[in-house]
Amino acid sequence: MALELIGGSILSALIEVLVDRLASREVLRFFKSHELLDDDLLEKLKETLNTVNGLLDDAEEKQITKLAVKNWLNDVKHAVYEAEDILEEINYEYLRSKGGNLFTFPNPANRRMKEMEAELQKILEKLDRLVKHKGDLRHIEGTGGWRPLSEKTTPLVNESHVYGRDADKEAIMKHLLTQHNTDGSNLCAVPIVGMGGIGKTTLAQLIYNDRRVDECFQLKAWVWASQQFDVARIIKDILEKINASTCRAKEPDESLMEAVKGKKLLLVLDDAWNIKYNEWDKLLLPLRYVEQGSKIVVTTRDEDVARVTQTVIPSHRLNVISDEDCWKLFARDAFRGVNSGAVSHLEAYGREIVRKCNGLPLAAKTLGGLLHSVGDVKQWEKITINSLWGLSNENIPPALTLSYYYLPSHLKRCFAYCAIFPKGSKIEKHRLITEWMAQGFLVQPRGVEEMEDIGEKYFDDLVSRSLFQRSTRDSIFRMHDLISDLADYVSGEFCFKLGINESGCGLEGEHSCSLPERSRYLSITSGVPYGGGLRIFRSIHGVQHLRALFPLNFFGEADSEALNDILPNLKRLQMLSLCYLHDISSQLLNFIGNMKHLRHLDLSYTAIERLPANVCTLYYLQTLLLKECRYLMELPSNISNLVDLQHLDIEGTNLKEMPPKMGKLTKLRTLQYYIVGKESGSSMKELGKLSHIRKKLSIRNLRDVANAQDALDANLKGKKKIEELGLTWDGNTDDTRHEREVLERLEPSENVKELAIIGYGGTTFPGWLGNSSFSNMVGLTLSGCKNCISLPPLGQLSSLEELQIKGFDEVVAVGSELYGSDSSMEKPFKSLKILKFKGMKKWQEWNTDVAGAFPHLAELCLAGCPELTNALPSHLPCLSMLSIEECPQLVVSIPEAPMLNVIKVCGVRRMKTSLQL
């Protein structure tokens, strides 16, 4: 029942977006410019859509018990998607005009205009019929269901608070900390069993991060087991987590056996669904020589898995938490930042909501996030009496269904789209936001706020509601299995995951490989090394409305051939990923160039050597990913026609220069590299027009900057959102003055956090480098500046934490100039933690007699400084690691460093120390 009730909510959000698009300037201008089209048609369509939208709230309720209403909603949804498809074509023609081709249509195009008008007329008639056949549905003005008062993003939830699990934790810790296994084996397992959402992973994380565990075990590894227990993948993941290197001559299981031999290991296998005895034995084989007392913690909802993995230690069954602990978990999120007086009048309703969560922590946490900052008692009361509590669904608790039902409409489609991710997938935040953008899910209010910032707010809002969970890295997230099930439900017949293995292919969670004709979004995962596509692509021949196709783990030539057969039929594709498909044929590339609705194209890690010219007619294209396309040496000359392009990833390519007129791509946000060319069309001036570049930018071939004024025109100082900047010269130069003039004019914004200057040919640095106004700079690398005779004053960079200086061939002495102004009251390098000097051929002296310098330096490295003779700084109170290599004239006097615990010294003249090493 939950599927049908919520599906209409997505439809409401879809209609709202479609009505906005009907009123957009692109559509209006297009209709006005064509006498062929009836502009009254737009107004009629908009009116009808608004009428339909007013019926949805009543329809959502009645479809639970009335099949006819459910069918009515499905028909409306399909008609709305069809209308959106037509508007896609209209918008494409508008963008084509901006790309340089004005609205001039030959006769075939005129015919297509008439066809589009006829198709819109049919959709209007279909919607009119649906309105007339609405039966007893009532028109409700506005939205009948409650929506949160505020759509502002809430702060991300702190995951560290756990309630009601102290006894469970200590019971498991007792087993883990036992030095000897009672059966005499080196390794035994501790299964944690419980229903989904009960907190198995959270408990395992508590245990894994406990200080006692760190003291007891030499090696720790946390590995996600997944629904398919893939021993080879798990072994590779364990090797990665324990930072063990693999030898190409050895199999991974041999490498693992050597890495853990004689060491005490704690392995957590999280979320194991299906383990057979032979698979379990295969995993244990390379672990047989671990030290006595090693343990494996297995979290699972399956009793059979617990029986397979269980050894002498019995399974630990995790039960629901008490209502009081559930209340604490709920209240922590619901009342975060709210004064106690405001809580009292809501507590009774809150405790009733918590009671209905039935002790399930995930449900309490999710609903607490939903109700954060909602102070209206009536809105809390509506949740307690909502009919969704009475729905029966064996996979999804009613509390999670409610958490979706009460999402703001702009988040519904964003969340439902996530059904495309296989369970346990890593979800990369920025990547998902660009996919939402490609599908038009981000609603841009009037103002100057950028789409990426809107997407970040959407994403953070879903995190705050516990619909996404943070993984080990800041930008990587996952969905809990129950939340993934919820996304599957609410996406209905429009979003699917296909999987293929040696035994066949099927929809995730089902054995069928048949896709509904109305499918719009599809990901495909292959566990077959080569040729998997031949089997699986046959199943999507009849699905012609797909908007997104993401084949994952496809590599072979046969897969490319299979795609050649299927892609020409997918004329509505907006997103396509062929990442890692090694053999992309020229025929396949040409098909891609004809997919005029593409907004997101990923060709990363492929062997393509060129992009066809017709790619430059993909006027919708917002994201083009070419990462690690090592054979790609140039971009099409007309790429500047892609006026909507916002993300261009060329990291790891071998481009020689940028194509001409890059400055026309004024919407670009992502451009990691800009390669300066000798021609005026690829000069630094073009970079100056790209004012929205953010995060990271590396400028290469600065040797080819003909005029220093061009460097000023690049306007790096005005690019306030660049956080990492690289400036690279290639080759040698005789014109050191010109090089300095160029660098002088490449002064970045004071917001830059990391700066690298590589291959600079001047003899001195400009005054801006080292200026204390760069208070955000935490990392600085100066490398290969072979003509420089002195170092810049860097000591007053107040936030600088890491400084690397390499390849300064002409520097003889590092004196007081490095530490900065004598008039400053600040200690030089007050935040510096890592300092490295490498490859300083003529460096002889280092003036270390500067009071208070380097108060927080933790790591000091000197390497390849053959002439350096004098002593190191005498007092480094925080130094923990000292490394000196290939400094044959240096007499090393170990500084006063009470924290020093790692010393690596080789290739020096002599070492003096009073320390006991």
Image (spheres, grey):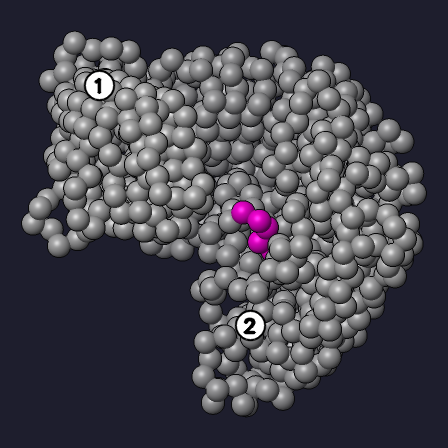
Q: Which residues are magenta?
A: 467-473
Question: For this view, does 368 lie left or right of residue 275?
Answer: left
Location of residue 757 (image quadrant): top left
Which residue occupies the foreground of this view, 27 or 793? 793
Compute the Cα span from label 1 to label 2: 60 Å
Location of residue 804 (image quadrant): top left
Question: For this view, does 304 lie left or right of residue 571?
Answer: right
Which residue occupies the foreground of this view, 474 or 205? 205
Which residue occupies the foreground of this view, 363 or 101? 363
The residue depicted at 35 percent of the width and 43 percent of the height is 914
Under mark 2, the amino acid is Asp
Mark 1 lies on residue: 842
Neighbour tally class for label 2: few under 14, some 14-19, many 20 plus, Cα within 10 Å: many
Q: For the residue labelled by badge 2, is the local secondary structure a helix, a strand or a loop?
A: helix
User: Residue 333's mark?
Assistant: 2
The residue depicted at 41 percent of the width and 41 percent of the height is 881
Looking at the rendered image, the disc whose residue lies closer to the viewer, 1 or 2, is 1
Mark 1 or 2, nearer chain start? 2
Under mark 1, the amino acid is Lys
